[in-house]
Image (cartoon, rainbow, N blue to C red):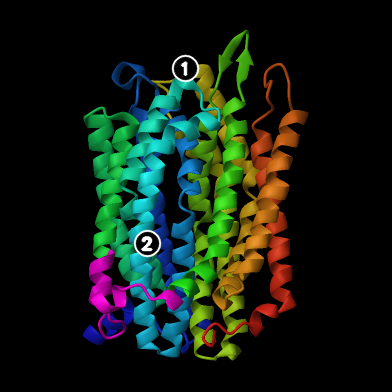
Amino acid sequence: MLSKIKGLFGAQDMTIGKPMSNIAKFAIPLLLGNLAQQLYSTVDSIVVGKYCSVAKNGYNGVDALSAIGVSNPIINLLLVLFIAISTGAGILVAQYFGAKDKQRLSHCVGTSITLIFVTSVVITIIGVPLSGPLLKLISTPEVYYAPAKEYLQIIFLGIIGGGFYNIISGILRGLGDSFYPLIFLVVAAVSNIFLDIWFVAGLNMGVGGAAWATILSQAVSAVLCLVRLFRMKDIITVNRQSLKPNGHMGLQVLKLGLPSGITQGVFSLAMVFVQALTNQMDYVVNGAIFNFVPAISVAVMRVDGFAMMPNFTFGLAISTYIGQNIGARRMDRIKPGEKAALQLSLICSVVLVLLLLLFGRNLIELFISRDNTEAAVYDMVVGQGGRALRILAAGYIAMAVSQVYGGILRAAGDTMSTMYISLFTTVILRVPVAYLLAHLTRSDVWPKGHPDALFISLLISWVMGAVLTYARYRQGKWKEIDILNQ
């Protein structure tokens, strides 16, 4: 019995067994973990949208929702190195684990932990004082500038918890362990929900309370992940020697991860430009000006986060599977793994698309309170949010293709091609198309363009990304990369 529990909950060797079973067994707890992680941001948004009011906080729920929304692109922009280290470490960990190379595996883990600590300190030093100027740069309206600045500064003060959780959970997944990150995330998610309600609804702390709830919960998950990692002595050795930065290993991590980090950085910069456009999209009726498009955007993106989870999950699962099998030189297992991951991802995506088409409007209603919002604004936010989800629905099927084949490319070490594809679809395609569509949809009611421009441009970029990623996979050049002998 104990051996069965250990086999279920411990690190998983994907170089043996049926590919479909390997990927499904790994993906189920990973999917639940992603669900718990998405609850962080979603609960923040729901609680501030429902409980913030002018009488208690000086701003209503729609403005609070907008404050969080305008903050997200800036947060992502400053997390470039987190993405780089996490991606590079995940690739190396999976391959070293597959090759059964305990010494290099331990050095990789130790070096990555040290890098993420230094990076967290740098991001805090840069992020806190720059929060205000960056919000001004993207034309944040005065009505929610102050809560947005407060939210940003608190998140950057506690960024080390999120950094450690992301890198260590990535390492655990590279080792084939998706169960314990799930357990730790559930604990953190429950803590986040409790603290959100207490700080925002109970103590009337507004968006600042939501930020404190987030960073404290992330700190809990980070500590639990560290404890789990230190106890995996049969697989890796984490001590003072392994934590000492290894120059060659650090360069390897950054070499593999920087393309993804740069991609995230440019993507976030592009989203800053899109956010600037979003912030300017006023709604004018009988001379009255309303600015609620940022609130629509953040509500849609929170629902989008749940809709994307199967795609991201199977992308991570296939990446770990491919990485371990390449490390073990089991190339015969690549094709069956690809087919299994694609089938699972497409099935989940089709089901979610149907649910969004049926219940999209109802999901948007979760984020704002009819009691604390003007009736016209409430109806517009809910109506436009539901419409946006219908526009994006087909894109989730395209993203299933992108994530599976992108995961294979990254696992093999072909991170440059995924970077170029992301840069093209996000910067060269999405941003200009968004501004062009906004220009073409200008009217007396929408003087800066209709919100549909934001979501149609996103759909176009997703579809093009799927086409280019699959084409790169079919070229087969990723098979020629040999990370272990570099």
Residue annotated with mark 1:
374
Residue at left 57%, top 40%?
272
Residue type at mark 1 is Glu
> Could you say which is closer to the camera, residue 4 or residue 292?
292
Residue 12, above or below 137: below
| Vertical relation: 106 (above or below) 69 | below
In the shown orientation, is residue 169 left or right of residue 388?
left
Q: Give the range drawn in magenta.
A: 225-249
State the image coordinates of residue 317 (x, y, percent, origin top left): 49, 71
In the displayed structure, 210 sits above or below 314; it is above
Q: Quadrant of residue 371?
A: top left
Tell which residue pokes out farthest to the front in this image.
Answer: 247
* Residue that protrudes farthest toward the right in the picture: 440
Near-viewer residue (161 or 344): 161
The image position of residue 120, as x and y in percent, is 36, 54
Q: Is residue 235 left or right of residue 94?
A: left
Residue 484, position in %: x, y? Answer: 51, 86
